[in-house]
Amino acid sequence: MHLRWLSAGLAIAVGLGAWLGFAGPAHASIGVGVQANPVSLTGTAHPGASYALPSLYIVNTGTQAESMSVRVVQRTGAGRAIPGSWIRIGSLSGQLPPKQSARIALELVTPGDAEPGNYVSDILVTGSTAHVAGVNFGAAAATKLEFTITPGPPGASWFPAWMWWAIGGLVVLAAAAFGWRRSGLRIRVERKNMA
Amino acid sequence: MGRSGLIILVAVLVALLGFARHSDSPASTSGQDPPAFGSSGSVTAHLKVVPTIRSVTVSPGSVDFHNCTQGAGDTASAGDQMGYPNGICVVGNTGSDGHFPVMVTYTGLAGNVWVSASGAAPDSGSGGWSLCVPTGKPACTGARNQPGNNQFTIMTFAQDAAYYQMLTGDAKCDTEFAASGECTAAPDQFQSVTGHEGIRLIGPAASDNNATSWSVNITWVAEYPH
C-alpha cells in the first residue's frame, strides 16, 4: 500500500518536473529596454578630441539572462549621420540577468577632419539568447544619440587661459577691498620724528 | 521676567499648540511625521512616476514551425518538415480559428515597434538561405516571384490585419502590431500594449545545403516616434 502511494507521488513529481523542464524555455520571454531620453553631449565637440558621453541605461525586461550588444545605427532625418567608429562603447561583463539594469559607458572620439554640424543617429541595444533550431526571437530598443561639432581646435576659447586667471585675481582683489571698507577698519600710518 | 520675556513665552506656547493641531490633521500624510506629545505613527505614501524607458518583450523566446504544406513528389512537406520546392510552414494560423502565438509587448513612453528578420542558418555545413521579397528588393528569383534556390520569404500576420507583412533584413514598421494597421504604440500611463502575431515562411525552390534543421531570427525593436 505504501509502495503504491510512493510510486504515485514519484510519478507526479517526475511528471511535474518534466512539464516544467519542457514548458520553461517555451514560455520564456526575451526583452530589452533603453532610456527614453536621448544621449546628448553637454556642450559642443571639436575635431580631434574625445569626450565622455552620458552613460546609456539598459534593462533586461525578459525572463532569462541575455547577451546585450550595443551599436550605432544610421537613421533618416535631419542631421549628419554619426560614423560608428566615432563612438567607443563600453562592454557589459557577461549576460544581464532578467529584470536587471546596467549602464554602458560611451565615449565620443572625433577625428581631426570632422565636419562641423549637428550629428544625429540611433543607439540600438539588442538582446539575444542561445539559438535553437526553428524561429529565434530577438528584442531590441533604440534611443537617439546627438551632439554638435564646432570648428576650431579642442579647448579653444574666445580668451586665452591667462586672461581668466587675471580676471579672477581682479575679482578677488575687488572683493577684499569692498570687505575692508565695510568692516570699518582703518590703518593709520605715522612717521616717527627721529630728531 | 520682564514684559518682553512674557511675550516670547506666550509666542512659543501658541506655536507649540498650532504644531500639535497640525500633527493631528488628517491631511498630514507625509511619510515621517514627528511624534506629537507622546503618540507616534507613520503613513507610507506610494508614488507612481512616468516611465523613462522604452522596451519591447517577446514571448515565447523561440518557436517551431508546424503544419507545413506544398512541395512536390518525394520532397513534399510532411507535418513539421518543410518540403521542396517552395514548401510553406506556419507558426499559428489565420482564418476563423485564428491562432497568433507570438506576443509582442511594448512598454514605456509612446513610440513605434519595428521588426526585421535574418537569413536562415543551417545547423550543419555552410551556406544559408537569404531573404527575398516577391516585389521589391532583394527580389525572389523563382517562378511566379516565388523564392528561388537558397532563397526564402518570411512574413508575419495578425488577426486585425488582412495581409501578411514581408520581413527583410532592414527593420520596418511592424504593421501587424496595432489593430489600426500601424506600428505606433501609445500605452496609457503605467500600462503596456501587446500585439499577437503569427509567422509564415515559404522555403526555397531548392537548397544547396542538405541540412535538415534550420534557424531564423526575428527581432522586434522599440523605437522613439520618427
Image: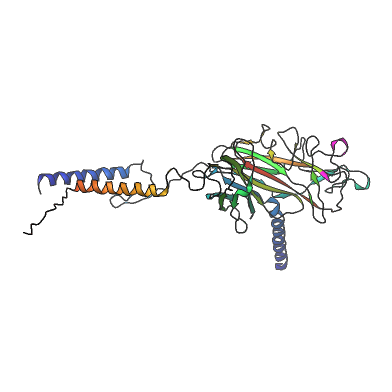
The quarter in which the N terminus of chain A is drawn is: bottom right
A64 within the magenta span = no
Question: Residue A155 location in percent, x, y?
Answer: 48, 48
Question: Residue A179 location in percent, x, y?
Answer: 23, 47
Q: Which residue is pictured at 42% across the width and 44% down the height?
A: A159
Question: Residue A91 location in percent, x, y?
Answer: 60, 56
State whether residue A131 is above or below residue B158. below
B148 within the magenta span = yes
Q: Is residue A48 left or right of residue B174?
A: left
- Give the residues in magenta: B138-151
The quarter in which the C terminus of chain A is drawn is: bottom left
The front one of B31 and B38 is B31
Quarter location, residue B141: top right
Question: Residue B71 location in percent, x, y?
Answer: 89, 43
Q: Which residue is pictured at 74% across the width and 54% down the height?
A: A132
The front one of A162 and A87 is A162
Extreme-left residue of the structure:
A195
Q: Which residue is pictured at 9% across the width and 57% down the height?
A: A192
Q: Is residue B216 visible?
A: yes
The front one of B184 and A154 is A154
